[in-house]
Image (tube, grey):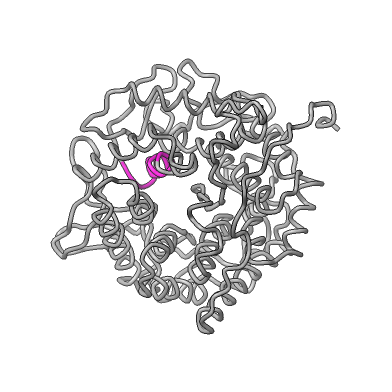
């Protein structure tokens, strides 16, 4: 009802979309593997539908809905929104229709609920936009824009750096209590660009574009210790918090979105590319090291020294380096090699466990390499980053080892994480009889299973010169400048 009072969204030429289905492998063995991944997706989805429908996530052992504070207090069907594009590309069209119907009837953003701006952007806005581009169904675009309007009050800070959380009803924002001195987090306010540019493209409203470009301009002006971006920035003062730098959690997707902003702009956003090149040059100089055993890893800068520890989240960087290799002037070969080295290190972190699944983070201290030391870091929660890197390396090199490694991970997930009510994370990858954590994460359906499916598909499914994946693996089309409202194209405006 409320939507009807508003002006309808302007008609916008949809970019020429290539490769939204297909990718059927010619090889029979690969086809069987792809079918297996599809069956795993169906198992995850069907159980969510039976036991958790409408809830954000599923507890597959307790067989009931589950939610965490990132989604606030309301049932927003995070798994449905996150899984839509995976269902679509797998050809699970009945399941896709069920998800669409729930979104039409039940997805409501006018709730008194405090949500993570970053998580809601990458999972919900990213998921809805991708579903819209793949299926052409207007409802997804309308919902994405409704939600985006609810996130805008988060930017009402003295600097324009958004709060980490916003109440969808009141628009009141605040930061996480644990973040350095009330700071916002680099990977959170730095991971809005792709979705917000598409929002401006689809609505003709420049406000989204302006918000993210303002963040970029502010970061460009700031002094960076050793050329590195710290993970914390105070939205009141515009000053850095603690000088911690990481390519894992708290930093990761900021760097990814600099590269992807350039790719998504059809390689015309040179400013983004330069920021990416400068950032990874500093990362390579200060954070990337080789262990005694010859493994290349990305450490974390803390309090003036390098911590020799790499998180599972940082394993995405292997894929990022190869994706950015083309366009790095004379260093393309170097970045392909670096990406392959990171992939090998992350594969070792899987291979050196009892379950052949990787821990949350792993150390490189003297005798121990690529192994988790603390009990609190031995869990695997169905994360996608290592498989994501295997997929990018497969696309760019077609070296069969990446399919082999991906299949090893798929079999380990099937063996140790599958339960009769879905898939669950495990608490200790070094124990041959691990306890389950009883959560089926929405990103397992959005990312882990999508990257596995793509790994065993032909390159004509979502080709990388036409699609750029957001950090939740939601594919968004490359925007050719002639098509965009940002180019001042009067026909579109």
Which x, y percent locates residue 205? 64, 26
Q: Residue furthest bottom?
A: 28
Residue at x 23% of width, y 29% of height? 225
| Percent coordinates x, y for residue 429 in the rendering | 39, 68
Q: Is residue 241 above or below residue 62?
A: above
Residue at 24% x, 50% y: name it.
Answer: 331
Q: Is residue 407 left or right of residue 309?
A: right
Which residue is more in the foreground, 422 or 188?
A: 188
**Residue 144 relative to residue 462: left or right:** right
Q: Is residue 294 magenta?
A: no
Answer left or right for 1 relative to 53: right
Q: How many marks?
A: 0
Q: Which quarter shows the C terminus? A: top right
What is the span of residues highlighted in magenta in the rendered image?
246-258
Rendered position, 348 above or below 256: below
Q: Which residue is depicted at the point 44% across and 18% down?
A: 236
Q: As rendered, which of 319 and 1 lies closer to the eye? A: 319
Examine the structure image and report whether residue 257 is included in the region drawn in magenta.
Answer: yes
As rendered, which of 60 and 8 lies closer to the eye?
8
Quick one: quadrant of the N terminus? top right
Q: Please tell me which residue lies in front, 300 or 112.
A: 300
When asked about the image quadrant of residue 113, the answer is top right
State which quadrant residue 441 falls in: bottom right
Q: Position of residue 104 (x, y in %)?
A: 79, 46
Query: Residue 312 appears at what percent x and percent y?
Result: 37, 56
């Amino acid at each position: 009802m409320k939507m009807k009072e508003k002006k309808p969204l302007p008609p916008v030429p949809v970019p020429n979309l290539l490769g939204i289905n297909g990718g059927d492998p010619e090889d029979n063995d690969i086809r069987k593997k792809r079918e297996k991944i599809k069956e795993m997706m169906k198992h995850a989805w069907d159980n969510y539908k039976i036991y958790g429908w409408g809830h954000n996530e599923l507890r597959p052992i307790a067989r009931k809905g589950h939610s965490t504070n990132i989604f606030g207090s309301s049932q927003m069907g995070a798994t449905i929104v996150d899984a839509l594009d995976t269902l679509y590309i797998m050809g699970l069209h009945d399941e896709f229709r069920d998800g669409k119907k729930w979104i039409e009837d039940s997805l409501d953003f006018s709730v008194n609920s405090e949500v993570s701006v970053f998580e809601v952007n990458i999972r919900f806005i990213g998921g809805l936009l991708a579903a819209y581009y793949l299926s052409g169904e207007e409802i997804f675009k309308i919902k994405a824009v409704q939600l985006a309007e609810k996130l805008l009050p988060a930017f009402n800070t003295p600097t324009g750096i958004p709060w980490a959380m916003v109440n969808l009803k009141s628009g009141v924002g605040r930061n996480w209590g644990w973040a350095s001195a009330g700071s916002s987090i680099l990977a959170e306010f730095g991971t809005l660009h792709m979705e917000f540019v598409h929002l401006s493209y689809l609505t003709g409203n420049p406000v989204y574009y302006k918000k993210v470009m303002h963040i970029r301009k502010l970061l460009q002006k700031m002094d960076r210790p050793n050329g590195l971006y710290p993970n914390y920035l105070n939205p009141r003062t515009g000053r850095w918090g603690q000088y911690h730098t990481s390519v894992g959690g708290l930093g990761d997707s900021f760097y990814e979105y600099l590269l992807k902003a350039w790719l998504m702009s059809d390689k015309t956003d040179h400013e983004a590319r330069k920021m990416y090149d400068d950032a990874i040059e500093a990362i390579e100089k200060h954070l990337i090291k080789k262990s005694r055993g010859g493994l290349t890893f990305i450490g974390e800068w803390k309090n003036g020294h390098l911590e020799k520890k790499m998180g599972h989240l940082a394993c995405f960087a292997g894929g990022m380096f190869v994706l950015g290799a083309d366009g790095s002037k004379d260093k393309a070969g170097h970045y392909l090699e670096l990406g392959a080295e990171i992939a090998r290190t992350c594969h070792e972190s899987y291979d050196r466990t009892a379950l052949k699944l990787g821990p949350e983070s792993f150390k490189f201290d003297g005798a121990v390499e690529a192994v988790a030391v603390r009990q609190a870091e031995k869990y695997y929660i169905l994360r996608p980053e290592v498989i994501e890197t295997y997929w990018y390396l497969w696309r760019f090199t077609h070296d069969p080892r990446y399919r082999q490694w991906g299949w090893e991970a798929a079999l380990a997930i099937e063996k140790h994480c599958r339960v009769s009510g879905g898939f669950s994370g495990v608490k200790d990858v070094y124990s041959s009889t691990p306890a389950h954590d009883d959560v089926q994460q929405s990103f397992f359906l959005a990312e882990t299973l999508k990257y596995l499916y793509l790994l065993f598909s032909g390159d004509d499914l979502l080709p990388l010169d036409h699609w750029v994946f957001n950090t939740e693996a939601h594919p968004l089309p490359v925007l050719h400048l002639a098509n965009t409202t940002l180019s001042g194209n009067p026909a579109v405006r």
